[in-house]
Image: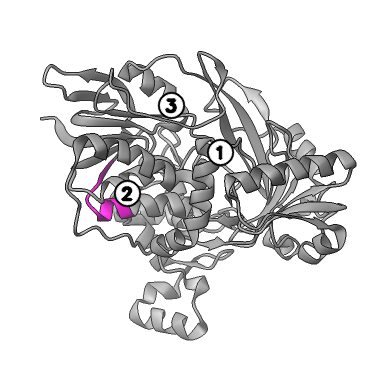
Amino acid sequence: MLKKYDVLVIGGGVVGSAIARELSRYQLKIGVLEKNPDVCLEMSARNSAVLHGGFAYEIGTNKAALCVEGCMEFDEVARELDVPFIRTGKVLVGNTPEDMESLKETLRIGKINGAVGLEIIDEKRLKELVPAVEGSFALLSPMSGILDPFQYTIGLAENAVKNGARYHLMREVTGIHREEDGTYKVETSKEDFRTKWVINAAGLGAVKISEMLGITGYKMGGTRGHYIVLDKAVGDLLPMPVYPVPSTTYMGIHVTPTVEGNVTVGPDADRVTDLANYGVEQHNMDYLVEDASTLWPHIHRKDFIRNYAGIQPTWLDREGPMKDFVIEAREDVPNTVNLIGIESPGLTAALPVARRAVQLLVEREKPEMNSNFDPTRKRIQRFAEATPEEQAELIRENPDYGEIICRCESVTKAEVLDAIHNPLGVETMIGMKYRTRSMMGRCQGGYCQMRIAQLLQEEKGLDVTQVLYAREESELFSGRVR
């Protein structure tokens, strides 16, 4: 028996989950198909975690308008979804007359786009804001900020589930067929579904899904950007993101604080054809250090705790490179909403993109509102963020708060258990990591990883060989270990 929905969203990343949340404002039966074991494993997780101000995008584009909209509303969104967020501001740092002219043009474009508070500041003001930076002047964007992209994506998904949506993980779409009654049969790697509407929010897989729908003409390449994560010991030296003067196609290698106090360095931009290869090579790390140190000379190998990479897609249509988001509902392919080109600033613009996509459906379907919609979600209680008095009370109420599983980030057994029993049904190591920050500290799981794996086995009834790190075929063990 096929599972039947009014709407199937293909892709459970930040944009797909934002769409599911916006759809849940209406009386619709909503399903989300995600090929991975969690909602935050590709572009939504592998980025700079910056809330952009909207000044870097061409005038009149969806990118510009939706980025500004997403930036301006994010204080409220972060409160609703309990997402760690700091409106730090951001500086684009220059030194030459050519840099100054570029920043003046960026300022002009930003003001037309509606970006708020932009100004060019001198070296004295720059040093007041970021004492450790090297530069002669800068463009200041006071509305830019930093957020937790894992918690944002997970928060959107969990809020969608709270309001009635259902997620189907590890269901890679393999075929889409329009039936005689006008509905769609959607085939996946594990089971098939029936739906009246299909929304393509597949991110790196969007072209593939578009072609399955019968919408052709789009192509995609990619660049792989590499990052270095620095220890919290240097976090106080970087109060806000520091960028170089951007080119017309690339924002450049930058240094960015995280909401938890680390610093990330990157990304560079290697052209790639393999959109699933997230490896980081030594020469990439060396280049990141050399380039970023001209802006912020506090990048030392003793502070490296991790590296990672993200794939940034490059989109083409019949006329060449695409410079904007495509959000379309075409009459020749009825009951579909097709999203193509949702790259940076997709994290910032996720909810505005979702509203535009859902509005295309609402205009045609005219569903009733969901009077029980609740926009709020609470993340897992962080023991490390509680006061000593609150910590004592938590332990009195639940002794599992008294057992530390992750020493680096002070994550307790109670938090890990809450993460294991999450609303989405995720049961991977990376799922626990993104929900609790376990395995994110200086030792990167050296102390806690095996304890978390054991708890996953016990709580989920998994065999040792079924414990996955992140994706399918990422088994941690081939058999029993001591």
Q: Marks 2 and 1, how far apart in space?
A: 21 Å
Place of residue 377 in the rendered image (x, y in percent of width and height, measured from the top left): 35, 61
Mark 3 neighbour density, 10 Å: few (under 14) some (14–19) many (20 or more): some
Foreground residue among 479 and 263: 263
Q: Marks 2 and 3, how far apart in space?
A: 21 Å
Chain part drawn in magenta: 159-167
Place of residue 14 in the rendered image (x, y in percent of width and height, measured from the top left): 43, 44
Q: Marks 3 and 1, how far apart in space?
A: 16 Å
Residue type at mark 3? Gly
In terms of image quadrants, where is residue 3? top left
Q: Quadrant of the N terminus?
A: top left
Residue at 27% of width from left, 61% of height from top? Answer: 374
Of callouts 3 and 1, the N-terminal one: 3
Q: Is residue 166 magenta?
A: yes
Q: Is residue 75 magenta?
A: no
| Residue of label 3 | 205
Residue type at mark 1? Ser
Residue 21 bears which disc, if any?
A: 2
Mark 1 neighbour density, 10 Å: few (under 14) some (14–19) many (20 or more): some
SS at badge 1: loop
SS at badge 2: helix
Residue 344 bears which disc, if any?
A: 1
Foreground residue among 221 and 304: 221
* Mark closer to the observer (3, 1): 1
